Image (cartoon, rainbow, N blue to C red):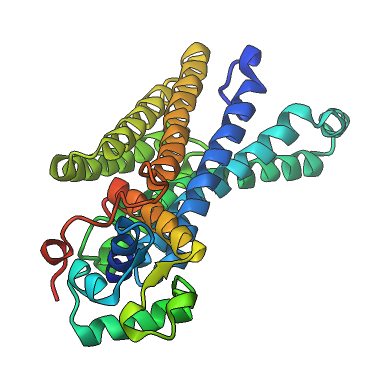
Amino acid sequence: MEIISDMLVAILQKGGSIKPTHLMYKANLSHNQMKGYLEELEKKNLVAKNDNEKESKEKVSIKITSNGRTFLAKYGEMKEFEKTFGL
Amino acid sequence: MKIVLTPDWFLGFDVLIELFSFIVLVMFLVLSLKNYRMNKNKKNFLYIGIGFGLIALAQLATILTKTVLYYDFNLIQQVGQAIVTSNFVSSVDIFYYIGFFFYRFLTLVGFYIIYRLHNKRTYLGESLLFGYFILISALLSTEIYYLFHLTCIGILLLIVRNYYGIYKENHFLNTKILLIAFSILSLSQILFIFPNGTLQATANIVELISYTIFLFLAIKIGKNGKKKKSDGDNIRYAGGNPAKRRKH
Protein backbone atom coordinates (compact mmCIF):
# COMPACT_ATOMS: atom_id res chain seq x y z
CA MET A 1 0.00 0.00 0.00
CA GLU A 2 2.90 2.32 0.79
CA ILE A 3 4.48 1.58 -2.59
CA ILE A 4 1.22 2.27 -4.35
CA SER A 5 0.85 5.61 -2.57
CA ASP A 6 4.48 6.47 -3.40
CA MET A 7 3.81 5.80 -7.06
CA LEU A 8 0.64 7.89 -7.09
CA VAL A 9 2.38 10.74 -5.28
CA ALA A 10 5.27 10.61 -7.76
CA ILE A 11 2.73 11.05 -10.55
CA LEU A 12 1.05 13.93 -8.73
CA GLN A 13 4.34 15.69 -8.11
CA LYS A 14 4.89 15.66 -11.85
CA GLY A 15 1.58 17.40 -12.39
CA GLY A 16 -0.61 14.30 -12.72
CA SER A 17 1.27 12.62 -15.55
CA ILE A 18 4.71 10.99 -15.61
CA LYS A 19 6.93 8.94 -17.91
CA PRO A 20 7.42 5.31 -16.75
CA THR A 21 11.20 5.71 -16.36
CA HIS A 22 10.73 8.77 -14.14
CA LEU A 23 8.17 6.94 -12.09
CA MET A 24 10.62 4.06 -11.61
CA TYR A 25 13.25 6.39 -10.14
CA LYS A 26 10.86 8.56 -8.16
CA ALA A 27 9.18 5.59 -6.50
CA ASN A 28 12.50 3.79 -6.05
CA LEU A 29 11.42 0.61 -7.84
CA SER A 30 13.12 -1.85 -10.13
CA HIS A 31 11.81 -2.26 -13.69
CA ASN A 32 10.07 -5.54 -12.91
CA GLN A 33 8.57 -4.27 -9.67
CA MET A 34 7.20 -1.21 -11.40
CA LYS A 35 5.74 -3.26 -14.25
CA GLY A 36 3.87 -5.45 -11.77
CA TYR A 37 2.58 -2.56 -9.70
CA LEU A 38 1.55 -0.58 -12.75
CA GLU A 39 -0.53 -3.49 -14.02
CA GLU A 40 -2.22 -3.70 -10.63
CA LEU A 41 -2.85 0.05 -10.52
CA GLU A 42 -4.31 0.03 -14.02
CA LYS A 43 -6.53 -2.91 -13.14
CA LYS A 44 -7.84 -1.00 -10.11
CA ASN A 45 -8.30 2.09 -12.27
CA LEU A 46 -6.00 4.18 -10.10
CA VAL A 47 -3.81 5.15 -13.07
CA ALA A 48 -4.26 5.14 -16.82
CA LYS A 49 -1.97 5.35 -19.80
CA ASN A 50 -2.44 8.61 -21.68
CA ASP A 51 -4.80 7.69 -24.52
CA ASN A 52 -3.37 9.87 -27.27
CA GLU A 53 0.13 8.58 -26.64
CA LYS A 54 -0.68 4.87 -26.68
CA GLU A 55 0.76 4.21 -30.11
CA SER A 56 4.24 5.64 -29.62
CA LYS A 57 6.07 3.60 -26.99
CA GLU A 58 8.62 6.28 -26.13
CA LYS A 59 5.96 8.87 -25.50
CA VAL A 60 3.79 6.75 -23.20
CA SER A 61 3.00 8.47 -19.95
CA ILE A 62 1.07 7.40 -16.90
CA LYS A 63 -1.61 9.65 -15.47
CA ILE A 64 -3.42 9.45 -12.17
CA THR A 65 -7.19 8.94 -12.34
CA SER A 66 -9.85 10.45 -10.09
CA ASN A 67 -9.99 7.05 -8.35
CA GLY A 68 -6.27 7.39 -7.70
CA ARG A 69 -6.79 10.80 -6.11
CA THR A 70 -9.62 9.44 -3.96
CA PHE A 71 -7.39 6.55 -2.90
CA LEU A 72 -4.70 9.00 -1.77
CA ALA A 73 -7.22 11.02 0.25
CA LYS A 74 -8.45 7.87 2.01
CA TYR A 75 -4.88 6.69 2.52
CA GLY A 76 -4.04 10.05 4.16
CA GLU A 77 -6.98 9.69 6.54
CA MET A 78 -5.95 6.13 7.40
CA LYS A 79 -2.35 7.15 8.15
CA GLU A 80 -3.55 10.07 10.29
CA PHE A 81 -5.77 7.70 12.31
CA GLU A 82 -2.99 5.10 12.59
CA LYS A 83 -0.46 7.67 13.84
CA THR A 84 -2.91 9.23 16.29
CA PHE A 85 -3.65 5.90 18.00
CA GLY A 86 -0.12 4.53 17.58
CA LEU A 87 -1.49 1.45 15.81
CA MET B 1 -32.49 2.45 47.02
CA LYS B 2 -31.96 5.21 44.41
CA ILE B 3 -31.44 3.82 40.91
CA VAL B 4 -29.58 6.85 39.54
CA LEU B 5 -27.60 9.41 41.51
CA THR B 6 -28.17 12.28 39.07
CA PRO B 7 -29.85 15.24 40.86
CA ASP B 8 -33.46 15.93 39.86
CA TRP B 9 -32.63 19.28 38.24
CA PHE B 10 -30.14 17.54 35.95
CA LEU B 11 -32.37 14.66 34.86
CA GLY B 12 -32.66 14.63 31.09
CA PHE B 13 -29.45 16.58 30.54
CA ASP B 14 -27.48 13.46 31.43
CA VAL B 15 -29.35 11.53 28.71
CA LEU B 16 -28.51 14.27 26.19
CA ILE B 17 -24.82 14.07 27.16
CA GLU B 18 -24.93 10.29 26.74
CA LEU B 19 -26.59 10.70 23.35
CA PHE B 20 -23.81 13.07 22.31
CA SER B 21 -21.17 10.57 23.55
CA PHE B 22 -22.92 7.82 21.61
CA ILE B 23 -22.73 9.83 18.36
CA VAL B 24 -19.02 10.60 18.88
CA LEU B 25 -18.27 6.93 19.63
CA VAL B 26 -20.14 5.83 16.50
CA MET B 27 -18.02 8.29 14.51
CA PHE B 28 -14.85 6.58 15.77
CA LEU B 29 -16.37 3.17 15.05
CA VAL B 30 -17.09 4.22 11.45
CA LEU B 31 -13.60 5.72 11.05
CA SER B 32 -11.97 2.52 12.35
CA LEU B 33 -14.04 0.22 10.14
CA LYS B 34 -13.42 2.41 7.10
CA ASN B 35 -9.68 2.13 7.69
CA TYR B 36 -9.95 -1.62 8.29
CA ARG B 37 -11.78 -2.02 4.98
CA MET B 38 -8.92 -0.22 3.30
CA ASN B 39 -6.18 -2.27 4.95
CA LYS B 40 -7.48 -5.62 6.17
CA ASN B 41 -4.00 -6.73 7.18
CA LYS B 42 -4.08 -4.24 10.03
CA LYS B 43 -6.32 -6.00 12.55
CA ASN B 44 -5.80 -3.21 15.11
CA PHE B 45 -8.17 -1.00 13.11
CA LEU B 46 -10.82 -3.64 13.63
CA TYR B 47 -10.07 -4.11 17.33
CA ILE B 48 -10.15 -0.40 18.15
CA GLY B 49 -13.41 -0.21 16.19
CA ILE B 50 -14.84 -3.04 18.32
CA GLY B 51 -13.68 -1.19 21.46
CA PHE B 52 -15.42 2.05 20.46
CA GLY B 53 -18.43 0.10 19.20
CA LEU B 54 -18.91 -1.65 22.55
CA ILE B 55 -18.71 1.64 24.46
CA ALA B 56 -21.22 3.12 22.00
CA LEU B 57 -23.55 0.16 22.65
CA ALA B 58 -23.10 0.72 26.38
CA GLN B 59 -24.16 4.35 25.96
CA LEU B 60 -27.17 3.19 23.97
CA ALA B 61 -28.13 0.77 26.77
CA THR B 62 -28.02 3.52 29.39
CA ILE B 63 -29.86 6.00 27.13
CA LEU B 64 -32.71 3.51 26.60
CA THR B 65 -32.88 2.53 30.25
CA LYS B 66 -32.84 6.13 31.50
CA THR B 67 -35.36 7.24 28.88
CA VAL B 68 -37.79 4.61 30.14
CA LEU B 69 -36.95 5.51 33.74
CA TYR B 70 -37.38 9.29 33.28
CA TYR B 71 -40.04 9.60 30.61
CA ASP B 72 -42.23 6.52 30.56
CA PHE B 73 -45.00 7.99 32.71
CA ASN B 74 -47.29 5.14 31.81
CA LEU B 75 -44.84 2.71 33.32
CA ILE B 76 -44.40 4.91 36.40
CA GLN B 77 -48.15 4.95 36.90
CA GLN B 78 -48.27 1.20 36.50
CA VAL B 79 -45.51 0.85 39.08
CA GLY B 80 -47.54 3.03 41.43
CA GLN B 81 -50.61 0.86 40.93
CA ALA B 82 -48.66 -2.30 41.26
CA ILE B 83 -47.04 -1.57 44.58
CA VAL B 84 -49.16 -4.33 46.05
CA THR B 85 -48.23 -6.78 43.31
CA SER B 86 -44.58 -7.26 44.09
CA ASN B 87 -44.04 -9.45 41.02
CA PHE B 88 -44.59 -6.52 38.66
CA VAL B 89 -42.33 -4.20 40.63
CA SER B 90 -39.52 -6.73 40.57
CA SER B 91 -39.86 -7.17 36.80
CA VAL B 92 -39.45 -3.37 36.42
CA ASP B 93 -36.40 -3.57 38.68
CA ILE B 94 -34.95 -6.36 36.54
CA PHE B 95 -35.31 -4.15 33.45
CA TYR B 96 -33.25 -1.39 35.07
CA TYR B 97 -30.69 -3.80 36.46
CA ILE B 98 -30.19 -5.45 33.09
CA GLY B 99 -30.02 -2.08 31.28
CA PHE B 100 -27.44 -0.63 33.64
CA PHE B 101 -25.56 -3.94 33.85
CA PHE B 102 -25.08 -3.90 30.07
CA TYR B 103 -23.96 -0.26 30.26
CA ARG B 104 -21.30 -1.09 32.85
CA PHE B 105 -20.17 -4.38 31.34
CA LEU B 106 -19.88 -3.13 27.74
CA THR B 107 -18.12 0.08 28.83
CA LEU B 108 -15.50 -1.85 30.77
CA VAL B 109 -14.94 -4.42 28.00
CA GLY B 110 -14.68 -1.62 25.41
CA PHE B 111 -12.08 0.28 27.41
CA TYR B 112 -10.21 -2.94 28.11
CA ILE B 113 -9.95 -3.71 24.37
CA ILE B 114 -8.60 -0.20 23.71
CA TYR B 115 -6.06 -0.71 26.51
CA ARG B 116 -5.00 -4.17 25.26
CA LEU B 117 -4.31 -2.93 21.73
CA HIS B 118 -0.91 -1.61 22.69
CA ASN B 119 0.21 -4.64 24.62
CA LYS B 120 2.24 -6.75 22.25
CA ARG B 121 1.98 -9.93 24.29
CA THR B 122 -1.42 -11.31 25.14
CA TYR B 123 -1.74 -14.00 27.76
CA LEU B 124 -5.00 -15.91 27.70
CA GLY B 125 -4.95 -16.35 31.48
CA GLU B 126 -4.45 -12.65 32.09
CA SER B 127 -7.29 -11.73 29.70
CA LEU B 128 -9.60 -14.25 31.37
CA LEU B 129 -8.73 -12.85 34.78
CA PHE B 130 -9.44 -9.32 33.56
CA GLY B 131 -12.71 -10.54 32.06
CA TYR B 132 -13.66 -12.09 35.37
CA PHE B 133 -12.96 -8.89 37.32
CA ILE B 134 -14.86 -6.81 34.76
CA LEU B 135 -17.87 -9.12 35.09
CA ILE B 136 -17.68 -9.08 38.88
CA SER B 137 -17.41 -5.31 39.08
CA ALA B 138 -20.27 -4.85 36.57
CA LEU B 139 -22.45 -7.22 38.61
CA LEU B 140 -21.57 -5.90 42.05
CA SER B 141 -21.92 -2.26 41.02
CA THR B 142 -25.68 -2.61 41.33
CA GLU B 143 -25.13 -2.64 45.09
CA ILE B 144 -21.75 -0.90 45.35
CA TYR B 145 -22.20 1.73 42.62
CA TYR B 146 -18.67 3.19 42.84
CA LEU B 147 -17.03 -0.16 42.08
CA PHE B 148 -17.76 0.36 38.37
CA HIS B 149 -16.24 3.84 38.41
CA LEU B 150 -13.16 2.60 40.28
CA THR B 151 -12.62 -0.16 37.70
CA CYS B 152 -13.17 2.37 34.91
CA ILE B 153 -10.56 4.71 36.41
CA GLY B 154 -8.09 1.81 36.61
CA ILE B 155 -8.47 0.85 32.95
CA LEU B 156 -8.59 4.49 31.78
CA LEU B 157 -5.36 5.27 33.63
CA LEU B 158 -3.72 2.32 31.89
CA ILE B 159 -4.95 3.72 28.54
CA VAL B 160 -3.62 7.18 29.46
CA ARG B 161 -0.25 5.60 30.33
CA ASN B 162 -0.18 3.84 26.93
CA TYR B 163 -0.93 7.02 25.01
CA TYR B 164 1.55 9.00 27.06
CA GLY B 165 4.21 6.49 25.95
CA ILE B 166 3.10 6.81 22.32
CA TYR B 167 3.08 10.62 22.54
CA LYS B 168 6.60 10.63 24.00
CA GLU B 169 7.72 8.75 20.89
CA ASN B 170 5.78 10.46 18.11
CA HIS B 171 5.18 14.00 19.53
CA PHE B 172 2.07 14.06 17.38
CA LEU B 173 -0.53 16.70 18.26
CA ASN B 174 -3.44 14.32 17.66
CA THR B 175 -2.03 11.81 20.16
CA LYS B 176 -1.70 14.66 22.68
CA ILE B 177 -5.36 15.56 22.11
CA LEU B 178 -6.32 11.88 22.55
CA LEU B 179 -4.28 11.75 25.76
CA ILE B 180 -6.05 14.86 27.10
CA ALA B 181 -9.48 13.45 26.18
CA PHE B 182 -8.83 10.16 27.99
CA SER B 183 -7.38 12.01 31.02
CA ILE B 184 -10.50 14.19 31.29
CA LEU B 185 -12.66 11.08 30.93
CA SER B 186 -10.73 9.55 33.87
CA LEU B 187 -11.37 12.73 35.88
CA SER B 188 -15.09 12.42 35.20
CA GLN B 189 -15.02 8.86 36.55
CA ILE B 190 -13.29 10.10 39.73
CA LEU B 191 -16.11 12.64 40.22
CA PHE B 192 -18.75 9.95 39.60
CA ILE B 193 -17.51 8.10 42.70
CA PHE B 194 -18.96 10.71 45.05
CA PRO B 195 -22.69 10.30 45.78
CA ASN B 196 -23.27 14.04 45.84
CA GLY B 197 -25.82 15.44 43.36
CA THR B 198 -23.76 18.47 42.32
CA LEU B 199 -20.65 16.35 41.85
CA GLN B 200 -22.64 13.87 39.74
CA ALA B 201 -23.80 16.72 37.49
CA THR B 202 -20.23 18.08 37.34
CA ALA B 203 -18.99 14.61 36.38
CA ASN B 204 -21.50 14.55 33.52
CA ILE B 205 -20.28 17.94 32.29
CA VAL B 206 -16.63 16.83 32.53
CA GLU B 207 -17.60 13.75 30.52
CA LEU B 208 -19.23 16.02 27.94
CA ILE B 209 -15.99 18.05 27.68
CA SER B 210 -13.96 14.88 27.09
CA TYR B 211 -16.31 13.66 24.34
CA THR B 212 -16.28 17.12 22.76
CA ILE B 213 -12.49 16.79 22.53
CA PHE B 214 -12.95 13.32 20.99
CA LEU B 215 -15.33 14.84 18.44
CA PHE B 216 -12.82 17.57 17.62
CA LEU B 217 -10.18 14.87 17.15
CA ALA B 218 -12.39 12.79 14.82
CA ILE B 219 -13.02 15.88 12.67
CA LYS B 220 -9.33 16.79 12.73
CA ILE B 221 -8.30 13.29 11.62
CA GLY B 222 -10.69 13.47 8.69
CA LYS B 223 -9.60 17.00 7.73
CA ASN B 224 -5.84 16.50 8.10
CA GLY B 225 -5.96 13.22 6.22
CA LYS B 226 -7.52 15.05 3.30
CA LYS B 227 -5.20 18.07 3.62
CA LYS B 228 -4.31 19.16 0.15
CA LYS B 229 -1.42 20.91 -1.44
CA SER B 230 -2.06 24.05 -3.43
CA ASP B 231 -2.39 21.88 -6.57
CA GLY B 232 -5.26 20.06 -4.89
CA ASP B 233 -3.52 16.76 -4.29
CA ASN B 234 -3.08 14.80 -1.12
CA ILE B 235 0.53 14.01 -0.32
CA ARG B 236 0.64 14.47 3.44
CA TYR B 237 1.50 10.89 4.19
CA ALA B 238 3.48 9.93 1.14
CA GLY B 239 6.20 11.46 -0.92
CA GLY B 240 9.57 12.44 0.51
CA ASN B 241 12.22 9.89 -0.17
CA PRO B 242 10.65 6.44 -0.62
CA ALA B 243 14.06 4.77 -0.48
CA LYS B 244 14.65 6.12 3.01
CA ARG B 245 11.16 5.26 4.22
CA ARG B 246 10.82 1.79 2.77
CA LYS B 247 12.92 -1.31 3.14
CA HIS B 248 12.83 -3.61 0.14
In-image side of B41 versus B248 (left or right): right
Q: Residue at the location (25% across, 55% down)?
A: B118
Q: Residue at the location (47% across, 29% down)?
A: B212
Q: Is residue B172 above or below residue B146?
A: below
The mark tally for this picture is: 0
Location of residue A33 (image quadrant): bottom left
- Of residues B117 and A47, which is closer to you in this image? A47
- Of residues B207 and A51, which is closer to you in this image? A51
Residue A59: give x, y in percent of width and height: 34, 78
Q: Quadrant of the N terminus of chain B?
A: top right
In-image side of B116 versus B192 (left or right): left
Residue B221: give x, y in percent of width and height: 40, 43
In-image side of A22 versus B62 (left or right): left
Whether residue B139 appears in this view of the structure is no
Whether residue B56 appears in this view of the structure is yes
Residue A73: give x, y in percent of width and height: 43, 54
Location of residue B149 (image quadrant): top left
Q: Residue at the location (64% across, 37% down)?
A: B63
- Of residues B39 and B228, which is closer to you in this image? B228
Q: Is residue B230 above or below residue A75?
A: above
Residue A17: give x, y in percent of width and height: 37, 65
Q: Quadrant of the C terminus of chain B?
A: bottom left
Q: Residue at the location (36% across, 27% down)?
A: B184
